[in-house]
Image (spheres, rainbow, N blue to C red):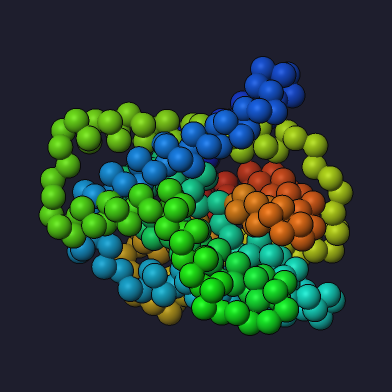
Amino acid sequence: MSVIINAVFPLFALILIGYLSALKGLLGRGAVDSLNKFVVWMALPALLFQAMAKISWEEINQPGYVAASALSIAIVFCVSCLLDGRRRGRLADVSIEGLAASYSNAGFMGIPLCLMLFGEASLPAVIIATLLTACVLFAFSIILIEVDLQGSPHLLPTLGKVGLSLLRNPLVASPLLGAAVAALQWPLPYAVEQFTSLLGAAASPCALITIGLFLAQKQPAGNAGAIGRIVALKLLLHPAVAFVLAYWVFDMPELWAATAVLLAALPVGTGPFMLAKLYEREPAVTSRAILISTALSVLTVSLLTAWLTGNS
C-alpha cells in the first residue's frame, strides 16, 4: 500500500488537479493546447536530450528489452487489426484502432511514473519505449493509412514524407540529438546541463496536469464495441504479452523487465487521437478510449505497481 501511495498517488493526483482545474474554470480550454505545446516542444525534449546525452552504450545495450517491447507492440497491433478487420475492413480505420490498442502513454505518464517508482536508472528504458511508440509504431500506422487513402501504394513518397515529419518531431529529434552527443563523447557544458535540468523538471507535472485538462473536456460518443476492444487490448493483453516476453522469453535485468511491463500497462496515449483527428477517421473512438483507459488505469496500474515492487 505504501508503494501505491508514494509512487502512484502523486501521478494520478496531478491528473486530478488538472481535471478539477478544468471543471472549476481555473484553466480554460486554451490551456490544454498551450500546456501540451510546452511539454511537447520544450520540457520533454529537454528531459530526453539530457538523459540521452549523459548515457553510455553499456547502459542502453539491452537487445532483449528492445525485442520484448517491440514484439509486444507488434502482437497487440496485429491482434487488434485481426479483430477489427473482420468488422470494417478499411485499412485506415483498422490501422488507427491497432495504433490505439498498442500505443502506451509513455511520454506523459511513463516518464513520471518510472522516475517515481524506479528512479533515473529507468530513464533509458522509457526513452527507448517512447521512440518505439512515437517513431516506429506511429510511422508504420501513417504509412498504412496513406497507402489506403491514396488508393495506390505510393510507398517511397509516403516513406519520405513520414521520415521528414518524424525528424521534425521534437520528441524524436531531441533524444536522437542527445544520442549523437553521447556517441561523440562530448560532455555537456554546465550551463546547458542546468538549462535542460530546469526545463526538463517541468515536463512531468505539466504533462500530467495536461492529461487531466484533456480528460475534463466533453468527449463525444463513439463506437462502443471499438472502444471496448481498444481498452481491453491496451490494459490487459499488452502488459500480459510484455510480461511473458520480458520474463520468460528474453534476457534482461529485472529493472528493465519491470519497466517493460509497466509501460505496456499504461493507458492509451494521445497520438492515436491526433492521427484520427488529422485524417477524420472517427476521432471520437480514440478520445473515448483515452478517457476510459486512463480512468481504469488508476486501478490496473496501482495493482501492477504493487505486484512488481512486491516481487522485485
Residue 234, given in percent of the width and then of the height, sits at 64, 61
Residue at (86, 49) in percent of width and height: 221
Say whether residue 106 is visible: yes
In the picture, the quarter occupied by the C terminus is bottom left
Residue at (48, 70) in percent of width and height: 160
Image side of residue 207 versus residue 125, left or right: right
Residue 26, given in percent of the width and then of the height, sits at 67, 17
Image side of residue 72 versus residue 227, left or right: left
Say whether residue 136 is visible: no
Residue at (18, 60) in percent of width and height: 183
Image side of residue 10 versus residue 120, left or right: right
Q: Is residue 171 above or below residue 22?
A: below
Which sits in the foreground, 62 or 1?
A: 62
Q: How many marks?
A: 0
Residue 184, given in percent of the width and then of the height, sits at 15, 57
Image side of residue 29 versus residue 248, left or right: right
Q: Is residue 11 above or below residue 72?
A: above
Which sits in the foreground, 113 or 179?
A: 179
Residue 304, given in percent of the width and then of the height, sits at 55, 54
Which sits in the foreground, 3 or 48?
A: 48
Q: Is residue 126 above or below residue 199?
A: below
